Image: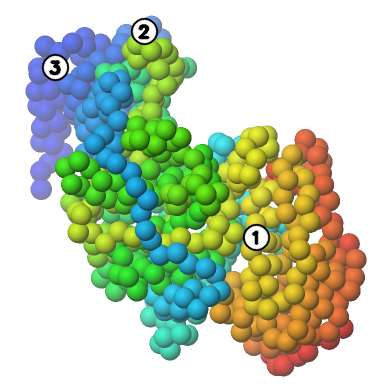
Amino acid sequence: MASSSSVNSAIDRLANLQLNELSTSSSPNLQKNLSILSPHQIELGKMLLELGQGHLFEHWSDPGIDDDDKRSLLSQVSILDSSYPGGLSSYIKTARELLSDSKAGRNPFDGFTPSVPSGEVLTCGDDNFIKYEEVGVKQVQNAAFVLVAGGLGERLGYNGIKLALPMETTTGTCFLQHYIESILSLSEASCKQTEVECQRDVPLVIMTSDDTHDRTIQLLESNTYFGMKPSQVKLLKQEKVACLADNDARLALEPNNKYRIQTKPHGHGDVHALLYSSGLLKEWKDGGLRWVLFFQDTNGLLFKAIPAALGVSASKEYQVNSLTVPRKAKEAIGGITKLTHTDGREMVINVEYNQLDPLLRATGHPDGDSNCETGYSPYPGNINQLILELGPYIEELSKTGGAIKEFVNPKYKDSTKTEFKSSTRLECMMQDYPKTLPPSARVGFTVMEKWLAYSPVKNNPEDAAKVPNGNPYHSATSGEMAIYRANTMILQKAGVTVDAPVTQVFNGQEVEVWSRVVWKPKWAVTFADVKNKIKGINTVSQKSTLVIKGRNILIDGLSLDGALIVDSVDDAEVKVEGSVCNNGWIIESIDKDNTEFPEEVRIRGFRINKTEQLEQFYGEPGKFCLKP
Ligand code: UGB
């Protein structure tokens, strides 16, 4: 073993060597400060100079500057360098190329002609849907789930993390709880269907960022992981990337701190590099897993679509399956598009909402992104639910390290495109993963009905109220109403007579208000489950609330006009029949600016007044009948 003195002298030699190399460099400020830096920091300083970033040392001789500030700048550089595939030099090189393309107005889709791709179109409740659900549920025990939740949700303007937001306020279940309970129930159903003992716990990875990491851990820990084993959940934190001040990709310093590089989020595409570098993919592969399912933070409907979509992946052997819904022109979701290049290349890929319109206009569609005779854009909307087959995914990532094709979106001061209004950065999107795949890769997509599969919470009340007529609000108001509509419509498809919805306006948004029907995933995770638990003639009035929390609850001859909440231990079987009539739970409009209400209520513009209900809990094993 080397003695500490020999190690120290090696470091000294290295530092001197670098000192000498730097003596001809363009930054006298850095040279003067070499004695306070570690060899690694000197190495980083040298790299920055070589990358044309000498301006970062401009303030190093300002009076009153602490050595710690200088060291902290280089510590930050070290993190930026190690967290980006290929390091900072690769980041700056790519940035220069993309900024030059942007300045020249080069179109990333140059040479490509868009056309409408074909995919598997599913209708909830029909035989095909049920068949795919069954195939999909069997596969869940071979799947891992990945939730990207590093976004701050600037558009929503909510102060907490979006995963902690109630998905609906009838039960107050937050998004993360619903996701976890859905995964647990699906996994249990999977083992039951295949009649095997569950060999493993289905893994859940959550990608966080500095904006969401601590609060995500707190949410999990204060709720005992919502029933998952802590070892089943892994958090991977994405780092932000350096901001760029100009077309030469000079790194931008914070306006109020000349010793800190300004950083911004790099986008959800980071998830691939993080998964790869974490070693989890290999662990999953060795453990016999076959699928990785990616999903976003606030789509409360998604798990209604997952079993059938996974069934499509397995049946069609798709290496990549994107879940989509019919898309309104100009809606802020990407469009899945077939792109054919003049050189013969072809790919089916998401074209982001801000790029679809110019691409169409440039390729002979003068109306750009517009609706066709169906009232929707012919390009199905990407809802960023991707199902990847693990084997080919690892193979691809071992070539790319998980790096995803990036883009840059600078806001220029004027038409000379020489200065930016504010700093920019490279970004990447998880749905761009297929861009590097060979043409032989099996890339497909599945179209689901929007009412069933997609209603995210992204927009604040003010912006939602300004959404063009007929386009979705994507707000907390519409997100909650979509849960009630989907659940009530599923009951209807299962044979229950339900009332038509009424139209009401909350926070300036006109929405359909259906009966407030909510169930726990352990009651039903598929359409077939719902059908099996509904018998006889049942009716639910529009003003009603029906909450089903227990596992074995059979609705058989219920007439509901009010609020009914049924819960039971897992070993109890409860048959619900007869007439339930009470004043129920009333939706009351509230003012979004009334600070008497918590923020998560104000962003909806309504609250639920729990006036009167029939609430029954069956705490013992056995057979029971709830007959009022
Ligand atoms: N996210 C991260 O985890 N890290 C980040 O750095 C950024 C985001 P947005 P966006 O389904 O409605 C996407 O901001 O990016 C997470 C698709 O690109 O909600 O505008 C974040 O926490 C678009 O094609 O959405 O649009 C959240 O969970 C379309 O499909 C997720 O990434 C659209 O979503 C999405 O972030 C949609």
Residue 38, position as x, y percentages in the image:
23, 28
Per the model, the C-alpha gap separating discs 3 and 1 is: 63 Å
Q: Looking at the image, is mark 3 or mark 1 earlier in the sequence?
A: 3
Which residue is most to the top? 63
Residue 492, position as x, y percentages in the image:
68, 72
Measured along the vertical axis of the image, is residue 313 above or below residue 422? below
Does residue 211 appear to the left or right of 455 in the view shown?
left
Does residue 435 appear to the left or right of 532 in the view shown?
left
The residue under label 3 is 22
Q: Quadrant of residue 627?
A: bottom right
The amino acid type found where label 1 is placed reads: Ile
The amino acid type found where label 3 is placed reads: Leu
The residue under label 1 is 483
Residue 48, position as x, y percentages in the image:
23, 23
The residue under label 2 is 62
The residue under the point 75% across, 75% down is 497
Label 1 CA crowd tier, 10 Å (few <14, some 14–19, many 20+): many
Label 2 CA crowd tier, 10 Å (few <14, some 14–19, many 20+): few
Measured along the vertical axis of the image, is residue 498 above or below residue 258? below
Label 3 CA crowd tier, 10 Å (few <14, some 14–19, many 20+): some
The residue under the point 31% across, 23% down is 105
